[in-house]
Amino acid sequence: MINVAVLTLSDKGSKGQRQDKSGPLISEMLKGVGEVKYYDILPDERDLIKNKLLEYADKVDLILTTGGTGLSPRDVTPDVTLEIIDREIPGIAETMRMEGLKKTRRSMLSRAVAGVKGQCLIINLPGSPTAVKENLEVILDVIAHAIEKIKGDPTECARQ
């Protein structure tokens, strides 16, 4: 089982002005794949996000963020993620955007990123429950393999 942290980034959610539906949806979708060990809701504040990502990266195999991936001035999740990761994995975010384009052209506006910090995989998901479901569905089957590779699994990746 993969140890997971879910981090919801929402000014309104952190103040209790909006119920977080995306974080619990992520937890539900991960059943059978991973166990959510940590779950927090933070405002869209760079330092808070950075500190929490760094804290989680030492404790879990996977961090899934939800929210803060758009174009508004307070959407800083991808910027903070890029600041702390050691290596980017562009194919994950590209795949999410490509699949999203099949449903809405607004998918191209997502700035979500994915990358590795130490031995932890970090993936930014959008904030809306519908977009979370659509994005996570398209990458869910590669997450375990990615984490195995991040942790040094020497087996071949080629399809048989």
Image (cartoon, grey):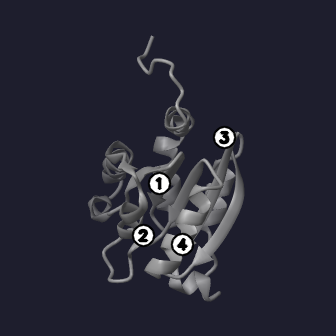
Where disc 4 sits, the SS reads helix
| Mark carried by residue 51 | 4
Closer to us: mark 3 or mark 2? 2
Question: Which numbered disc, 4 or 2, marks the residue that appears first in the sequence?
Answer: 4
Question: Which numbered disc, 3 or 4, marks the residue that appears first in the sequence?
Answer: 3
Q: Position of residue 78 (x, y in %)?
A: 38, 65
Q: Position of residue 127 (x, y in %)?
A: 48, 68
Distance between the Cα atoms at labels 1 and 2?
Answer: 10 Å
Distance between the Cα atoms at labels 3 and 4?
Answer: 26 Å
Q: Which amino acid does the dot numbered 2 rest on?
A: Thr
Work out whether residue 60 or residue 24 is closer to the camera in this orientation and state it: 60
Residue name at image x 55 percent, y 86 percent: 12
Residue name at image x 54 percent, y 57 percent: 64
Asked whether residue 123 is in view, the answer is yes
| Mark carried by residue 123 | 1
Distance between the Cα atoms at labels 4 and 2?
Answer: 12 Å
Q: Position of residue 146 (x, y in %)?
A: 49, 36
Distance between the Cα atoms at labels 1 and 4?
Answer: 16 Å
In this rendering, the answer to whether 129 lies above or below 103 is below
Residue name at image x 48 percent, y 71 percent: 50
Residue name at image x 65 percent, y 47 percent: 30
Question: Which numbered disc, 1 or 2, marks the residue that appears first in the sequence?
Answer: 2
Where disc 2 sits, the SS reads helix
Where disc 1 sits, the SS reads strand
The residue that disc 2 covers is 77
**Label 4: few (<14), some (14–19) or many (≥20) C-alpha neighbours in 10 Å:** few
Q: Which amino acid does the dot numbered 4 rest on?
A: Asn
